[in-house]
Amino acid sequence: MATTQTLLVSIADTIKDYRQGEIPQPTPTHVAKWVNQFDASQQSAILNEMDVLLKKTYFNKATMEGFLSNLVSNAKLVGANPAQFWHSVNFLDIQDGGSSQHEMLMMFSQIMKSKLGIRLDQCGSKGGLYVYLDDMSFTGNRVLNDLNKWIRDDAPSKAAVHVIVGAFHSGGQWYADKGIQETAVKEKKSISLAWWRMMELEDRVNSNNTSDVFRPSSLPTDATMTSYVNGLAYPPPLRDAGHMGQCKVFADEQGRHLLEQQFLTAGLRVRAMCPNLPATHRLLGYASTNSRKTLGFGSTLVTFRNCPNNCPLAFWAGDPWYPLFPRKNNIKKFARSAAIDRDSIPF
């Protein structure tokens, strides 16, 4: 195992562009302050496993730009004439909460301008397909709610929609796709969906043994954990030890088990520190009231833009807990003038 200082430096370097320009750049001291909240005997091991994990699941800005840059000329998407294809695309800017979609659209506009000489405000055509662009999809609720509202209020009677995200989770994608199609049928509209992503992570409860999220194989045996679990609607199903998931984001079973146990215990501490946290903010991350069988969503993904609340509380919960990834909350979509040149707005 690498030395503690080496691991602190490595993790800080991996996440160095997290919320760049909004908060101070993460440093080894910042990472140390976070890990020092855990049991001293486990800190080196936690750092070692987090170093491995974040190198696979932290999406920095360059990674996201590379994904979008490749899509600009991806023949499976655009055919033989990328410029003609993108000129005809109608880009949806319909996200009701947060700014991730708007920021991703600005990023994509700059990439198109660099590669093809096309700005986003030069795109769009009657009968052209629609693109819903965002950074990540977790539970699928954001995509579902945004597109359902668009289908009810603004969509034409027939449309093809491409959902483009850096990564999505299998269960969330299935849930969103199903719900969108049901709304289209109800509204008597023909909506076809296609999904594009860099990474797909398994999160379905019935696929725990192939999951790529935090899904423990056992629970800490202390009374506090027992009390918390007894308060859930159903006993959480546990993963069979030894199963590592499809994307291999964890180093091995020992490392995965360590992180799952430590984040469960830390989550209990966070909830004790912050008794007003909603019940949906579970130990391993936000899970809606419909997901009553889990200890939390358990996402392993963080982007340069923000940390989702679907990650363990130990990642992002604030004062008095010290977060590794200080999180900005979503706000309602701000008013935007149609006359704004999107390429002139910093992101």
Image: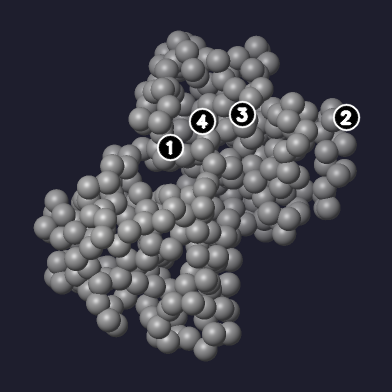
* C-alpha span from label 2 to label 1: 34 Å
- Nearer to us of marks 3 and 1 is 3
Can you see residue 217?
no
The amino acid type of the residue labelled 2 equals Ala
The amino acid type of the residue labelled 3 equals Gly
- Nearer to us of marks 3 and 4 is 3
Which dot marks residue 313? Answer: none
**Residue pointed to by mark 1:** 58
The amino acid type of the residue labelled 1 equals Tyr
Residue at image position (35%, 30%) is: 21
Image position of 31 (left or right of 223): left
Asked if labels 1 and 3 touch by Cβ distance under 8 angstroms, the answer is: no
* C-alpha span from label 3 to label 4: 9 Å
User: Which of the marked residues, 3 or 4, is nearer the chain's N terminus?
Assistant: 3
Q: Is residue 23 above or below residue 129?
A: above
User: Which of the marked residues, 2 or 4, is nearer the chain's N terminus?
Assistant: 2
* C-alpha span from label 2 to label 4: 29 Å
**Residue pointed to by mark 2:** 223
User: Which of the marked residues, 3 or 1, is nearer the chain's N terminus?
Assistant: 1
**Residue pointed to by mark 3:** 318
**Residue pointed to by mark 4:** 325
Asked if labels 1 and 4 touch by Cβ distance under 8 angstroms, the answer is: no
* C-alpha span from label 3 to label 1: 20 Å
Q: Is residue 199 above or below residue 184?
A: above
On the image, the x and y values in percent for residue 128 come to: 28, 78
* C-alpha span from label 4 to label 1: 11 Å
**Residue 282 falls in image quadrant:** top right
